[in-house]
Image (cartoon, rainbow, N blue to C red):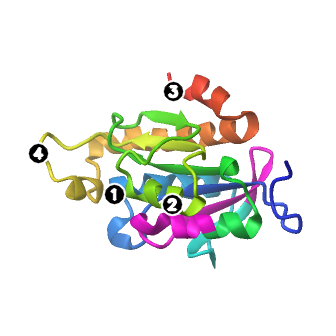
Amino acid sequence: MLFGNASSGVEWIVAGLGNPGEQYAHTRHNMGFLTVDLLAEQNKVKLNRVKFKSAYNILQFAGAKCLVMKPQTYMNLSGEAVGEASRFYRVEPSHVLVIFDDISLPVGKIRVRPSGSAGGHNGIKSVIAHLGTQDFPRVKIGTGAPEAGGDMIRWVTGEPPMKDREILLDAFGRAIQAAECVVRHGCQRAMNDFNG
């Protein structure tokens, strides 16, 4: 199957999920934003183009022409941006890679999945709704969960303590490596290499 809009050559979409605005910049829910910001920085580009309700840019990543994006819709509507870009560039869901936070994983743990349910994550629920399928690859970054009875919204929109920040910075780097492996070699190889 031919992927991508013939005129653009975009082969993959890499979407980091998060919430726009300074008050959310370093919160647990913004692990996806922080990861794609680092990816862009490593590739010496800025995600400063605006379209598809996103901040984005197009770059060579892992041997492919990738649209790297940060939806600006707020987390719960992330799928509006991802779906719009996917339709515009005719990128199949199997080539839409989403990077996001996961409270069910310990802080800094990376997990690659080829598909799956939203697992209670509203951003992923929205992406599933707008792509019309659960079958798209994802890289999850663990943030840990609040203690029993803790306020979940306050947890995900809160900033991690200093002791977790170094662990998470390292996790962003590994999440980028995992994303690169997915694009180059497929999910199975990335799962073998990064889900240990």
Q: Which mark is residue 27?
A: 1
Task: Please tell me how many numbered marks the rendered image carries.
Answer: 4
Residue positioned 69% across, 49% down in the render: 95
Residue positioned 39% across, 73% down in the render: 21
Query: 109 above or below 154?
Result: above
Residue 42 lies left or right of residue 126; in this view the side is right
- Which picture quadrant has residue 81? bottom right
Residue 147 lies left or right of residue 81; in this view the side is left
Residue 60 lies left or right of residue 39; in this view the side is right
Q: Amino acid at mark 3?
A: Asn
Earlier residue among tags 2 and 1: 1
Q: Amino acid at mark 1?
A: Thr
Q: Residues within 10 Å of mark 1 (few under 14, many from 20)?
A: many
Residue positioned 58% across, 71% down in the render: 55
Query: 77 above or below 60?
Result: below
Q: Which mark is residue 129?
A: 2
Q: Does the residue at mark 4 contact the one at mark 3 (Cβ under 8 Å)?
A: no
Q: Which mark is residue 149?
A: 4
Of the two numbered discs 1 and 4 in the rendering, the one whose residue sits closer to the viewer = 4
Of the two numbered discs 2 and 3 in the rendering, the one whose residue sits closer to the viewer = 2
Q: Residues within 10 Å of mark 3 (few under 14, many from 20)?
A: few
Q: Secondary structure at mark 3?
A: loop
Q: Which mark is residue 136?
A: none
Residue at the outermost right position:
7
Residue indicated by mark 3: 195
